[in-house]
Amino acid sequence: MAARFQVYEDAGGKYRWRLSASNNEIVASSGESFSSKAAAKGGAEAAKRAAAIAPIEEESKKGVSNG
């Protein structure tokens, strides 16, 4: 199975998303809750679009550098 985004209801009744790898390990999550399932799905879609074009940067003790 390929990686997948999952939208779920948290313990507080709000919605969140998480990205699971093909081995079911969670590799990313929303970090914030959303008031509706549709909003959480929209957040996952936005993360998916942003990740597709995001550069990979290396962080050093001096700060972040493009590399």
Image (cartoon, rainbow, N blue to C red):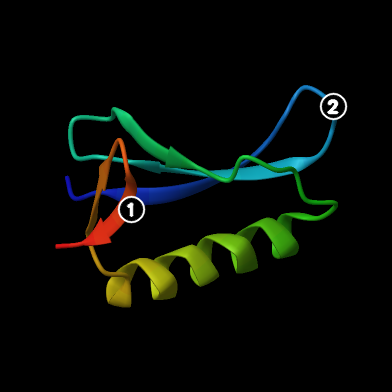
Residue 66 vertical placement versus 19 (above, below): below
Q: Residue at x 41, y 67 (%)?
A: 48
Q: Secondary structure at mark 1?
A: strand
Rendered residue at 24%/40% (across/down)? 21
What is the quadrant of the C terminus in the image? bottom left
Q: Position of residue 33 (x, y in %)?
A: 75, 43
Which mark's residue is nearer the viewer, 1 or 2?
1
Q: From this viewpoint, which residue is outermost toward the front?
A: 62
Residue at position x 85%, y 51% from top? 35
Query: Residue 49, image x and y in percent?
Result: 41, 75
| Drawn side of residue 6 relative to residue 41, left or right | left
Residue 67 higher or lower than 35, as above or below: below
> Which element carries disc 2, helix, strand or loop?
loop
Q: Amino acid at mark 2?
A: Gly
Residue 59 in the figure: left or right of residue 22: right
**Residue 20 percent coordinates (x, y):** 34, 39
Residue beneath the point at 33% across and 53% down: 64
Residue 42, numbered label:
none
Question: In this orientation, which residue lies closer to the viewer: 54 or 61?
Answer: 61
Instruction: Name the residue tied to disc 1.
Output: 64
How far apart marks 1 and 2 lie (CA) works out to: 35 Å
User: What amino acid is found at the position of numbered circle 1 in the picture?
Assistant: Val
Q: Which residue is mark 2?
A: 12
Q: Which quarter of the picture shows residue 28?
A: top left
